[in-house]
Image: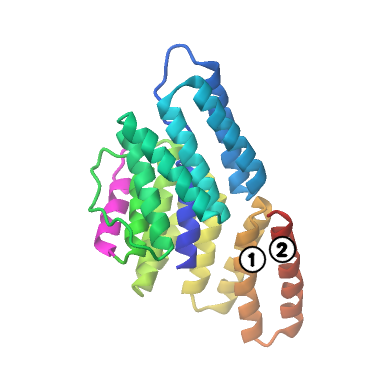
Amino acid sequence: MKQLVVLAAMLMLAACGSSGQKNPVENPYTERMKELSSNGVAAMQRERWLVAERLLERALQAAQLANDPDLIATAWYNLGTLHVSAGDVQKGEAALKRASGVAQRHRLEILNMRAKVALALLHQRQGREAWQPDVLGSGYPADIHLIAARLSQLQLRYDVARQEYDLVLRNSEVDRAAMLYKIEAHMGLALLAEQQLDHETAKQETALVSNMSRDVGAPRLAAHALLLSAKLIQDEAQKRDNLQDALAIYRALEDLQGQSDTLHQLMHLAEHNGDHIELQRLQEELDQVGEHMVADQ
């Protein structure tokens, strides 16, 4: 379940950025908002929360100067996603509500649905009463279907989650963004199968994630798949290899949380095998990762 929460946060990052309509002549503030948003998302993915907050607050200011409700709602959504991912759920909820409010006033249906589903996901993660939508219409973008699928999965409404994932996988677009959403959907199906103890299906879906991630260049998803596959397989040598491969990717990405999760699994394996020297080495590395995580807060 912890992996599902982490993936849900990463999924919300994928939806960040302007969804505004294109104009023949670009407003310079519109261009600035998009640039700041893109840089803010990059900082979020590296868990540089303070840097990301400054960038996304400036993106909001640029959106307001552009006087574009679409951009303003998107900027509030991005800030909400940032605060939720950084652990400040109170500020995150407030920003998502602002996004929804702007979207409702200006009849921006897609942005309103995006914020509404994100708020429901946040409430569900907090153990609060959360909206339980039926399967959303096929006209919504893939990122919204994915968030709705994660929400349904956490609510144990597996049939709805599968249908939402299926809507993503049936998307006929073949660009990189569409492929990344499909990889996310396969990862969600792998986690869903694991929750239902269907390990064979989980292995098949995880293999799809690994192969597709290699094709399009999605290292973080590849690492997530390796981490999950290590949990599913029995062969200890293969399990260790998968964990080491995942750790190498997380190191290259400077993903501290991923490194921490992987090191914990490797420590469990070393402890099980009675390898005290390896256990001590892994503990020292984990301590260093923990220090970096504290320093980055």
Compared with residue 68, is residue 104 higher up or lower down, i.e. above or below?
below
Name which residue lies at 45% across and 55% down: 8
Q: CA distance from mark 1 to mark 2?
A: 7 Å
Percent x, y of residue 163: 26, 54
- Give the amino acid at mark 2: Val
**Mark number for residue 42?**
none
Name which residue lies at 56% across and 73% down: 239
- Which residue carries the number 1 mark? 260
> In the drawing, does residue 115 fall left or right of residue 158?
right
Decide: few, some or many residues near mark 2? Use Cα within 10 Å; few <14, some 14-19, many ≥20: some
Compared with residue 69, is residue 262 higher up or lower down, i.e. above or below?
below
First to last magenta residue range = 157-172
Decide: few, some or many residues near mark 1? Use Cα within 10 Å; few <14, some 14-19, many ≥20: many
Q: Which element type, helix, strand or loop, lies under badge 2?
A: helix
Q: Which element type, helix, strand or loop, lies under badge 1?
A: helix
Residue 158 lies in quadrant:
bottom left
Percent x, y of residue 297: 68, 55
> In the drawing, does residue 89 fall left or right of residue 172?
right
Percent x, y of residue 168: 33, 46
- Which residue carries the number 2 mark? 289
Total number of numbered labels? 2
- Give the amino acid at mark 1: Ser
- In depth, the one of 200 and 195 nearer the eye is 195
> In the drawing, does residue 138 fall left or right of residue 24?
left
- Residue 28 visible at all: yes
